[in-house]
Image (cartoon, rainbow, N blue to C red):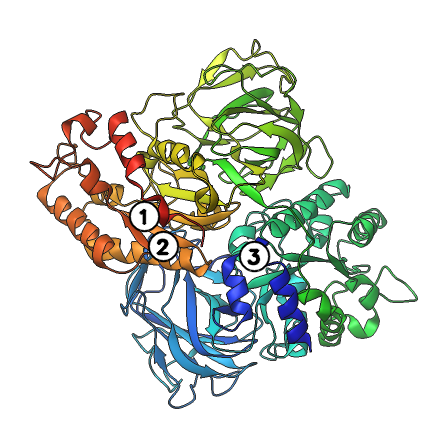
Amino acid sequence: MLRTYALAALLLVAPVVAPERVQAALGQEWTGTWQTAMSGTAPKTDQGLPKHSIRNVVHISTGGTEARVKLSNVYGKVPLLMGRVTVAIAARPDAADAVAGTMRELTFGGSASITIPAGAEVLGDAVPIALPAQTNLLITTYTPELSGPVTYHQVANQTSFMSPDGDHAADESGAAFTTRTTSWHYVSAVDVRGGPAFGSVVALGDSITDGNASTVNTNRRWPDVLSRRLGSSLGVLNAGISSNRLLSDTWNPNALARLDRDVLTATGARSVVVLLGINDIGGQPQHREPAPIIAALRQIAEQARSRGLRVLGGTLTPFGGSSNYTAELENVRLAVNEFVRTGGVFDAVVDFDAVLRDSADPHRLRPEYDSGDHLHPSDAGYQAMGNAVPIAQLSLPARPRDWWVGTWQTSMANTGAAMPDYSIRNLVHTSIGGREVRVRLSNVLSKVPVLMGHVTVAVAARPDAPDAVPGTMRELSFGGSASVTIPPGAEVVSDMVPLAVPEDGDLLVTVFTPGATGPVTMHPRAYQTSFLAAGGDHAGSESGTPFTTPTPAWHYVAGVDVRSGTAQGTVVTFGDSITDGDKSTPSTNRRWPDVLADRLAAEPGPTRLGVLNAGISGNRLMHDSSGIGGPGALARLDRDVLTAPGVRTVVLFVGINDIGNLDMPDASQLTAALRQAAAQIRAQGLRVIAGTITPFQGWRSYTERRESVRLAANDFIRNGGAFDGVIDFDQVVRDPVNPHMLRSDYDSGDHLHPSEAGYHAMGTSVDLRLLAVR
């Protein structure tokens, strides 16, 4: 009955849910069955774990007939070679032996090995294996080389195993695995297909969700209890990290900083249960006011709901008697719980506090539910928590909402000098119009929180000046507050305000930073002049007079979204300096994505799409770039592409900086990275169109060897079958006499970046039928 009801509910909200979630309801696509949130790097692994086989024991929630595995190097500092990876059914939950005949070799784009870029994750190919629900799996990795710090999840509450003497990944016997560990290394998720589940539930939390103090190897965390209650109807994905906080990092990233990776892109996610805040109250530094915690919970709810997820808020459980408890801090917990219960932010509430508290002393856990530290529940307490989750609420559609579509976006690339007491007026160019607007602000590359004291949006009077059209200035709020503190590594989205946003027009997004900022997150090469005013709050000024200092960068502002009655979604153009518009005239919007946006704006129906530019000058696929180039493309995929508002199609056009800047570029590694990007994009139900890499003979790093890599990559793009379509930018801009060079009229003069005529040719070469919403 639950399955039938949930399927009906899902189909009702199909217009506002990512396509793969509708397919998953019919059993045709992938569902997450197990997940962990990577928390940092394992101690004493500065050189990695060379020649180690690591056998991770994981407990899946729902079953299927095929599986795939995700591996993580998100906290690694260098690329990581996986020499071999296998999956098998575990013979026992506390041993390294596999059930005979179940060992499967995993591949990545058909290859038995894969290099994972620093900061990135990779998704394996499908492998046939019959997996019952509630089964223990062995995910074994072999790392043959030195690699740098090892990405892991520290507190697994599950014994896994290591062998330090070579490749034992395919051994059915566990005899070689003589070292035990209670952490998970490298493996971050398992998905299944061909089973009965129609989606998954994500549990986002801290040590209480992580299962701290539960019995090791018995899967008695509260999400495990929930999973057993659900049977096979929904997968359950545990995104808990011990010590995790909302407002600041500990030895792991704060919840908002990891939201894209751990929740919003989780396979098949339909709902999320949020249980966070107790470490912000009781940990160091202690937050003695509830307002910042409440604001962060609002942000999580809003960002999750924008992805079509249903959001359940969990009340914070008692901690009286624990080492950090005080009456003052208890009042903060009670205020947060009052907000969770009555604030109207969540689609439903799980009152964990009411379930666990002692009726005689509600500031403390019930004795039988207390593990002994007066903070973490016992196994019996976790059982009660899992039983308290209202299963019917997990299958209902999210609260009805209008469709947000991105009209402008940039990708944050590096940090600049601190700007305390500054008003920063960013000038941005829209692709589509709308009747309402919201703004996304970013602190993703900073290590400290930043306070936005005042934020506004207005229609710009001119594309090259800081003056606003009279009457268009709008004050932005965040959960009803005029100010917002953005945690390090995170982004926030504003509340909606009514504003007639022009199509193919210009907006002013102004932020005021009243206090210390730390390094400012920015996009340094905007090819658009914005403006600064030192000394005071001028965010609400219609006049541009206070803004006397021009800047070529965008600071803090990451995106602008609109509600539109006509737009069908957005196209994300994902690339490097050629997508960023290097050598185009500033403040004229002549990048090739701008040309594409103009063409789409003139089209009706399924090609009525916004265009979001996710290009970063100097960006690479396989490595982070020093200076302005930002995180590697695979490392930033979740944030800049997969969670972009309204995204339907991605144009993938990147690789020239890997070819031109690496000492020994390798065509097989480049094509593997392109294939991996396509796989992860497709895994979110999106179409991926690849652009061939344009000529660069005459550029300072050109060699015949590097050119051979470019040609091999382009042959793969055209003929490899990895993409839903191809835009042959190479053919469009190359010299017909010497195809290793740009056409002279399409060359900006540096022999790498196109001229404005070249950008126009690129933008007009895109077959709009490739982008049409299907």
Q: Specify the label residue 263 is tagged with.
A: 3
Q: Where is residue 606? Give x, y as percent.
A: 46, 47
Look at the numbered disc 3 and give the secondary structure of its residue: helix
Q: Is residue 438 above or below residue 279?
A: above
Q: Is residue 49 above or below residue 524?
A: below
Q: Residue furthest front?
A: 604
Q: Is residue 251 visible?
A: no
Q: Is residue 461 visible?
A: yes
Q: In 3D space, how far apart are the residues under numbered discs 3 and 2 (Cα atoms)?
A: 19 Å
Q: Is residue 704 above or below residue 433?
A: below
Q: In 3D space, how far apart are the residues under numbered discs 1 and 3 (Cα atoms)?
A: 23 Å
**Given contact means CB atoms under 8 Å apart, are the residues at marks 2 and 1 in contact?**
yes
Q: Where is residue 537? Give x, y as percent.
A: 64, 18
Residue shown at 43% from the left, 34% from the top? 602
User: Which amino acid, mark 3?
Assistant: Val
Per the image, the residue denoted by label 2 is 677
Q: Horizontally, is 450 left or right of 723 in the view?
A: right
Residue shown at 53% from the left, 76% from the top? 60
Per the image, the residue denoted by label 1 is 621
Mark 2 or mark 1: name the one nearer the start of the chain: 1
For label 1, the crowd category at 10 Å Cα-Cα, with few meaning under 14, some 14 to 19 and many 20 or more, is many
Q: Quadrant of residue 424?
A: top right
User: Which amino acid, mark 1?
Assistant: Leu
Instruction: Return the residue nearer the eye: 196 or 545.
Output: 196
User: Which amino acid, mark 2?
Assistant: Ala
Please state, as top left, top right, bottom left or bottom right, where the C terminus lies in the image. bottom left
